[in-house]
Image (cartoon, helix red, strand yellow):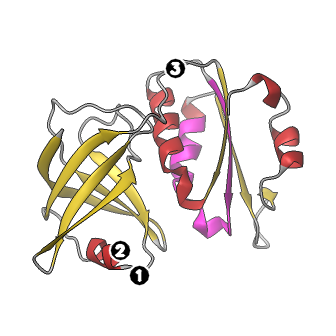
Amino acid sequence: MKFKTNVKDIILQTYNVKSFRFAKPASFNYKAGQFMFITIKSEKRKMTKHFTISSSPTERDFIEFTKKLTGSKFSNALEALKLADWAEIDAPYGDFTFEGEYKKMGMLSGGIGITPLRSICKYCTDMRLETKISLLYSNHSERDIIFRKDFEEMQERNKSLKVIFTVSEPSENWNGQTGRINSEMIKREIPDYIERLF
């Protein structure tokens, strides 16, 4: 489905990551984990790129993607976006989806790669699915952790969700896991990994 829309909200997630929310038609549906093509205008020129949808289908008032702002032409065009600016969305696409098919899952992610997993975890939490999820999420430092507050709130609501943050360059105040994700960390944090779909 292709539809014209407007910027509804822009959320600063970390010092260099923003989420962009857009109004969507009531008739538009997608699955957690899918992606979309977004077209925006920059200096009267249209630019198109595809992004994972970081919102969940349960968040019915908007559709959202989240981007690390890298100084590229598209990043700079996103930085210039203001509320109510025009955009066009073509979606949904992709088969990396989850609607409750499995009872136990393991998830591994680093940095901005968290976006489809955020959508899936939010969907499972809002739908009160009993799927047991263990997510290992690695970042450079704690200030790079995207959706940290989001995941902490989800864990409070969803006792079947366990999120383990790990950073490769911790500060003195960090008391979570350290280092990159490896087999030892997976075995320690997700001891029943053999029983899970990853």
Any mark on residue 71, and which? Answer: 1
Magenta stretch in the rendered image: 132-155
Residue marked by disc 2:
75
Residue marked by disc 3:
100
Q: Is residue 59 above or below residue 167?
A: above
Q: Which residue is rendered at x = 85% and y = 32% of the image? A: 191
Q: Residues within 10 Å of mark 3 (few under 14, many from 20)?
A: some
Magenta-span inclusion, residue 145: yes
* Amino acid, disc 2: Ser
* Amino acid, disc 3: Gly
Q: Quick one: SS at disc 2?
A: helix
Residue 55 quadrant: top left
Residue 79 quadrant: bottom left
Q: Residues within 10 Å of mark 1 (few under 14, many from 20)?
A: few
* Amino acid, disc 1: Gly
Q: Residues within 10 Å of mark 2 (few under 14, many from 20)?
A: few
Mark 1 and mark 2 in contact (Cβ < 8 Å)?
yes
Q: Which residue is rendered at x = 76% and y = 64% of the image? A: 174
Position of 179 compared to 106: left or right? right
81, 125: nearer the viewer = 81
75, 81: nearer the viewer = 75
Q: Position of residue 40 (x, y in %)?
A: 19, 65
Position of 74 compared to 67: left or right? left
Badge 3 or badge 2: first in the primary sequence: 2
The CA distance from mark 2 to mark 1 is: 6 Å
Question: Quarter of the image containing the C terminus?
Answer: top right
Position of 103 compared to 4: left or right? right
Q: Position of residue 70 (x, y in %)?
A: 45, 77
Q: Quick one: SS at disc 1?
A: loop
Q: Which residue is rendered at x = 78% and y = 22% of the image? A: 195
58, 29: nearer the viewer = 29
